[in-house]
Image (cartoon, rainbow, N blue to C red):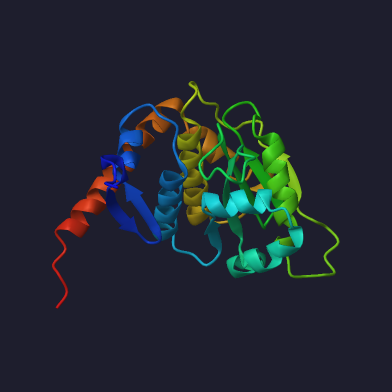
Amino acid sequence: MRKSEGDKKILSYNDVVLRKSDLDILSGPYYLNDRIIEFYFSYLSSYHPSKDILLAPPSIAFWTMNCPDSNSLDDFLRPLDLFNKKLVIFPVNDNDDVSKAEGGNHWSLLAFYRESNTFIHHDSNRGMNKHHAKRLYKAVARFTSNDSNLTSEPGYVECMESPQQVNGYDCGLYVTAIARSICSWYAQRKEVDGDGGWFCAVVEEVTPCSVANMRSEILELIRSLMAVKEYQPASR
């Protein structure tokens, strides 16, 4: 059977494969899918290369949150080396159906910051994903330390100052924008910013206008990477 035009592969970036349908999503006011968020997280990882930072792809976050056997998470999460990461960022989706790879209706962001030993949830729609973020936190918290004698498990905070979306489809863009802001703050910080952490940076940088621009920025980023690959000389 002939593949549809939307299934046409347009870019392979690290381990992420983007298709024409992903460009269509970015070209209009549509809900971001897993591939676009995974691509942008992979781009941020390349832009801020650090063994201290992990931007987990949506598939990792989804399975960790919905894994029916918590004991099997040991083998699944061990390669991520979470106990040696100082900053970990997860995209959170409200999909509860493990048979649907791209289900759900809302994205939010859960970040772990080792300096404060805290998971912080950023939700652009009034805490809509609070229940799912807490499920992910409870599933992954024990993997953030390899010290069996650690008595203080990581805390959990709902960021009440988190920027709020002004429409029903930009939640994924807020995740990408907040992730970018947090990574930039971490890369530029000279010392721990006290209890506020990156909150001030996120509030200042993630606005409805900047988020709206993210759609075209990611689209242009993909097109620029496509052009580089298209005109790259063949290896001999």
Q: Is 158 placed left or right of 185 in the picture?
A: right
Can you name the residue that lies furthest to the top here?
166
Write down the quadrant of residue 25 in the picture.
top left
Foreground: 92 or 189? Answer: 92
Residue 83 in view of the camera: yes
Residue at 57 percent of width and 51 percent of height: 89
Image quarter of residue 26? top left
Tell me what residue is drawn at x 82 percent, y 70 percent: 148
Q: Residue furthest bottom?
A: 236
* Image spot of residue 172 (x, y percent): 48, 36
**Residue 70 as seen in the image, left or right of residue 217:** right
How far from the left and from the top, in percent, is residue 168?
50, 23
Against 59, is 158 above or below?
above
Q: Where is residue 103, by image quadrant?
A: top right
Q: Residue at x 44, y 37 (%)?
A: 32
Quadrant of the image containing the C terminus: bottom left
From the viewer's side, name the closer residue of 74 and 216. Answer: 74
Q: 148 left or right of 222?
A: right
Any part of residue 117 in sight: no
From what the image shows, is residue 100 above or below residue 233?
above
| Residue 81 drawn at (x, y percent) | 62, 68
Horizontally, is 146 left or right of 88 in the view?
A: right
User: Percent position (x, y) of residue 52?
Assistant: 56, 64
Above or below, 70 against 181 in this view is below
